[in-house]
Image: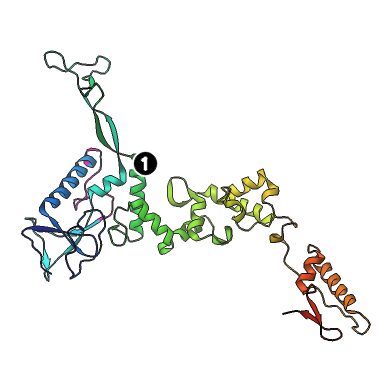
Amino acid sequence: MTLAINTTDAFATGTVANTGLGKRGDKSFSTGFQGQLIQISSRERQEIEVRESEAKRILLSQGIKEDFDGGPVGFPKTKVDFARDKEGNLILQNNLPVKKEIASWYDVRHMIARNEFVPKMVDEVDQSGNGVIDVATGKIKQIEVLNPDGSPVIERKVSVQPDLLERSLVASARLKELGIESIAAPKYRPGTTVIEAYELELQKNTRGVATNSLKKEGLKLSNFPRGTSIYEALKMVEKENDQGVVDPTKAKNLIRDMAILRAEELFTLKRFKSFGGTTPTKAVELLNDEPEKYRPTPADTQYKPLWKTPPPITVDLGKLSPQQWRNAVIANAKEANPAYTEEEIIAKFGFDRVISLGTGWFGRQR
């Protein structure tokens, strides 16, 4: 591989390998073109640095601290770039750049901050150019800047969202507990937030994190409806604003509601899901509102009791006609399985399709 270091720059989104530089179109900082060295111009590198500087300035001004390595405190690495010396030149080993994980302020800004579009305000001044003081507040009055047509000038304002900041820091700490300190490509899709990254680990049950969360409240899969995965079980009892943590109240309610459903011979949520019954608690609410709609009944063949093998009967085939023998078999089966009709029993034994191959022999016609 040859790098035109004097005229171009480079940026990595994946594994650095001794392959071609790729196409000029595959050069975005954030699109996630993975697995190769991406050639970009010096101007594009400067644009990246401008975005980083702007994001860093905004976040620092709103209380985010800078870590010892230059990234935002509490957040994992989000990008793979190349190491540089003090003059900004790429550091090469075996003619290849040295890969380095970095925490991008630009990425973190998108995780915890949101754009607002508000009227542009300026200080109100008098004819002498002095600021007009608001008597009520003791501060200079603010007025809107207007366009030539009289409409207000709108400007973009970036604000850190306290709830996103809190949830992101918690997710970052929990990722670190799993030994994950980087959410850079190619392990995660570029642009993945720390909240999304931790959710992916919950889905994969990395290091048994979802299972352990359920165990802390004494729950296991047998407490949930049949066919529920570990991740689905966790989501049923998860705290509203605490990712991956079981709510004790929800856990108690789940055990109570599953007992109600099982008493009605309802072991899955299949009947309820299309009506919004995605958890046992919601399923019980639906069941209480319309019990006949959801409760299985003997008339519903899908929920008939399991077939019981009837006890053996002793008959003298020499003294019975074929029809009498069939009637005895049906009566014997009916006594063991009263929920089944005679028609169902006849069909089960194949008496609806009988051929005679000699006295006392009956069987299904193939």
- In the image: residue 297, left or right of residue 230: right
Colour style of the rendered protein structure: rainbow
x 23%, y 60%: residue? 13
What is the x, y in percent for residue 319? 94, 82
- In the image: residue 235, left or right of residue 79: right
Say above or below: 318 vs 13. below
What is the x, y in percent for residue 214? 50, 57
Q: Is residue 189 magenta?
A: no
Q: Secondary structure at mark 1?
A: helix
Quarter of image, res 366: bottom right
x 92%, y 85%: residue? 318
Quarter of image, res 28: bottom left
Q: Which residues are magenta?
A: 60-78
- Closer to us: 124 or 77: 124
The residue type indicated by label 1 comes to Asp
Pointer 1 residue: 163
What is the x, y in percent for residue 225? 58, 58
- Closer to us: 298 or 141: 298
Q: In the current view of this chain or complex, which residue is farthest to the right?
A: 319
What is the x, y in percent for residue 194? 33, 52
x 50%, y 59%: residue? 215
